[in-house]
Amino acid sequence: MLRNGWLALMLVALGMPAHAQKGAPGFPSWAYVMGPGAVAPKVPDDGTRFSVPGSTARFTRDQTRDRFAPPDWHPDDHPAMPAIVAGGRPPAVWACGFCHRPNGAGGPENARIAGLPAEYIAQQLRDLVSGARSTVLPTRNAAHLKRAIVKALTDEDIQVAAAYFSRLAPRQTLIVKESERAPKTVNLLNIMAAGDDGEWVKLDDDRIVEVPENLERFDVLRDDQVKFLVYAPLGSIAKGRALARAPGGNAALACAGCHGADLRGAGRVPSIAGRSPSYVVRQLWDIRAGARNGQGAQAMKPIVTALSSQDMLELAAYLATLDP
């Protein structure tokens, strides 16, 4: 898929495995995808109008990469977007729909925010501004951009965007399977992708591979209905289920105690069902490291501290299989 044409220009560090990044012992570098800094050259817009399955819309290359008017391929799938979501506020505030997509699906590099409680979304944005929510790798492109954009939001922007995304119904975008092998991956700027040679490699027990089913549609055309293929180590889903229900045999620590019986959230506590494994592991690791220190994160800290990196991976594998 990536071998021919302009899409190949997206790749950086071709052949670099996602797990080759350096970090502390046990550090889940596969969850913190960060390209080495090189950016693919911008491909000129030749006027071609692109399409995606299930949509009658057509957009040119420049339109698909417009941060202040992101493509809305499926406008009938969501309510009318408020101005801050559809267009942002140039030059500092990109449209929320550019990164998180018009339907709130997001991707492994950020978050699916569709259906989250409005109060929770608003608080996370405020925590980003105050520094209560950060990450152990703040130089990641997605994290760096998010902080810069959020700091330029007004309180009204936050309230309007949170209200919009909270009304959306989350969709399952993950196809999860346990496997001994997975596609060899390359790192783009924010996500991992299957290499263009079609090579498969042994899947290590300490790693999950999460790649878009169609890279061009997700990362270039920005279609918000693209699914992700998740390859998890053998046995990890059952182990994760046991941890989620009663980690360490202690029912008081079960995820359902706060996140609801079906793990789809309760009150202001967010849903964790059907979430990107990369995103889940980043949040658990950030909380344990103290990079996330907001009110909700503080409540999670004693629980997360008791989890090993392998526990986090197995929990993430299980949660990814659930309907959001």
Image (spheres, rainbow, N blue to C red):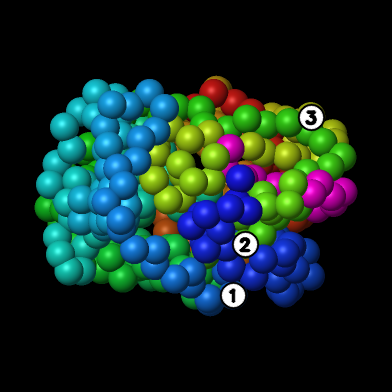
Q: Residues within 10 Å of mark 3 (few under 14, many from 20)?
A: some
Q: Nearer the viewer, mark 1 or mark 3?
A: 1
Marks 1 & 3, CB-CB < 8 Å contact: no
Residue positioned 52% across, 54% down in the render = 5
Callout 3–callout 2 Cβ contact below 8 Å: no
In this rendering, position of residue 225 left or right of residue 273: left
Q: Where does residue 272 sit, x and y in percent of width and height?
A: 53, 36
Cα–Cα gap, marks 1 and 3: 35 Å
The residue that disc 2 covers is: 187
| Residue at disc 1, secondary structure | loop
Classify residue 154 as left or right of residue 103.
left
The amino acid type of the residue labelled 1 equals Pro
Disc 1 + disc 2, Cβ < 8 Å: yes
Residue at 39% of width from left, 39% of height from top? 223
- Left-right relation of 73 to 218: left
- Residue 178 appears in the picture as rendered: yes
Element type at marker 3?
Answer: helix
What range of the chain is rendered magenta?
A: 199-213
Q: Mark 3 or mark 2, which is nearer to you?
A: 2
Mark on residue 36? 1
With respect to residue 127, does 241 lie above or below?
Answer: above
Q: Compared to 53, does 16 lie above or below?
A: below
Amino acid carrying label 2: it is Asn
Three-letter code for the amino acid on which mark 3 is drawn: Ala
Q: Earlier in the sequence, mark 1 or mark 2?
A: 1
Mark 1 and mark 3 lie on one chain; the one further toward the N terminus is 1
Depth order, front residue of 119/111: 111
User: What label does residue 238 carry, if any?
Assistant: 3
Q: How far, Cα to Cα, is label 1 from label 2?
A: 8 Å
In the image, residue 310 lies at what x, y percent? Answer: 78, 50
